[in-house]
Amino acid sequence: MKQIGGFFTYEPLPEVENHFLESLCPPEGDLGYFMSGRCANYYALEDICLTDQKKVAYVPVYTCETVLAPFLKAGYQLKFYGVSRDMTPVFDEAALEEISVVNLCGYYGFCNYDRNFIRKCSERGIVIIEDATHSIFSADGVDPCCDYVVGSLRKWIGISAGGFALKLKGKFTLPVREPDTTHLALRARLMEGNRQRMSCDGGQTIQQLNDSFWEAEMMLRRIFDSYGSDDESVDIIRRYDFNRLKERRRANYRYLLEHMPDHPQITVVFPRLPEGTVPSHFTVYAANRDMVQNYLAEQGIKSTTYWPRGAMVDTKGFADADYIYNHVLSIPCDQRFGAEDMEYVCQQIGAMPADHYT
């Protein structure tokens, strides 16, 4: 049985550097590498706090709690904006009078937010920080009005750290903490164990890998701060073949769009692939998500829920966001796989018994 998805592993790297993140940073800007996306986000917020006296952040109601945690740790009051079922942020212009920072997200690589609203924020001096974890490789993945861009590459490649922070107007001045070596060692052990399992070279079981992953994740959630990256992770970012990554993910997504069978359980969230968009996943709504996810797992397809609703989020008054949290499901379409693997995904979804999953 095929195995689709799961943890990334280390991969051979080209000798030539890609200069990808550097290309996003203007000469007057600055780039830092961090242990995770939340560490990068917190460091950027610390930098913003040097001048922000109001400290009210406009954040999406559909988001990961690890995006919100740095805002709270930095002392921000949160004001939520809605997100529609097609993953379009729903901004309220009345908020312009209240907020000092707006947080953006181009969900799953598709940047559907209102650029005119972001321009108005910029004109009023509201700081714009884009979490580009999902959208960093899309042609429109960074809004031109952004002041800061933060994110993580751990959803894209095998890497122990992977956080980055770009300041597009000025230099960072605050110190960066040394990375936590215990956490990085756990992450490295996880990826090596998965490499051995996939190469049939012994190693850890899937359950042991899951245990290692969550041990590392929960440790980072407890200790996150402005922790910098290890040198090996920076080297991976600088030398990874991102052009191949972009081409393969677009090809896989396109294959799934063209061949995904109609099924009463599955609704594709983004039924078009715009030119230049690089998807992080093939994202769907599943009518009965637990059943569909379990079925796919039985067929060797590891789907993911981004994200579980965190304790910091209240979806009262945000019906679409409530629906998203209850039904969204992400299917892998990353560069480890090709057309034959995507064909397998489509075949398994087509064979899923509809009556059992209603």
Image: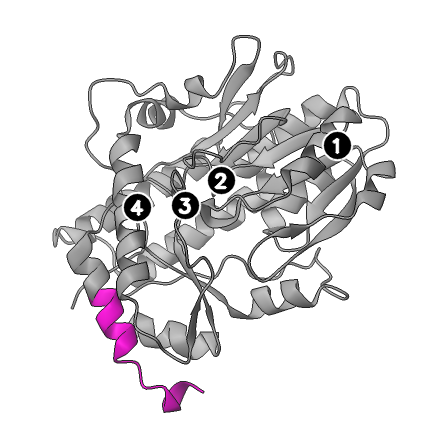
Cα–Cα gap, marks 1 and 3: 25 Å
Chain-order first, disc 2 or disc 4: 2
Judging from the image, what secondary structure is the residue with disc 2 in?
loop
Q: Which mark is residue 274?
A: 3
Cα–Cα gap, marks 2 and 3: 19 Å
Residue 183, how many percent across, how many down? 45, 39
Q: Which mark is residue 133?
A: 2
Judging from the image, what secondary structure is the residue with disc 3 in?
loop
Cα–Cα gap, marks 3 and 4: 13 Å
Residue 177, how many percent across, how many down? 56, 23
Q: Which residues are magenta?
A: 344-358
Residue appearing at x 51%, y 35% in the figure: 151
Q: With 158 as the anchor, is 198 left or right in this view?
A: left
Sort mark 1 into few (<14), some (14-19) or many (20+) by Cα contacts within 10 Å. some
Residue 186, how many percent across, how many down? 38, 42
Chain-order first, disc 2 or disc 1: 1
Mark 4: amino acid? Arg
**Which is more foreground, mark 2 or mark 3?**
3
Cα–Cα gap, marks 4 and 1: 33 Å
Cα–Cα gap, marks 2 and 4: 15 Å
**Looking at the image, residue 306 lies above or below residue 239:** below
Judging from the image, what secondary structure is the residue with disc 1 in?
helix
Magenta stretch mostly in which secondary structure? helix
Chain-order first, disc 2 or disc 3: 2
Residue at the extreme bottom? 355
- Quarter containing the C terminus: bottom left
Q: With 343 as the anchor, is 191 left or right in this view?
A: right
Determine contact: label 1, label 3, CB under 8 Å: no
Cα–Cα gap, marks 2 and 1: 24 Å
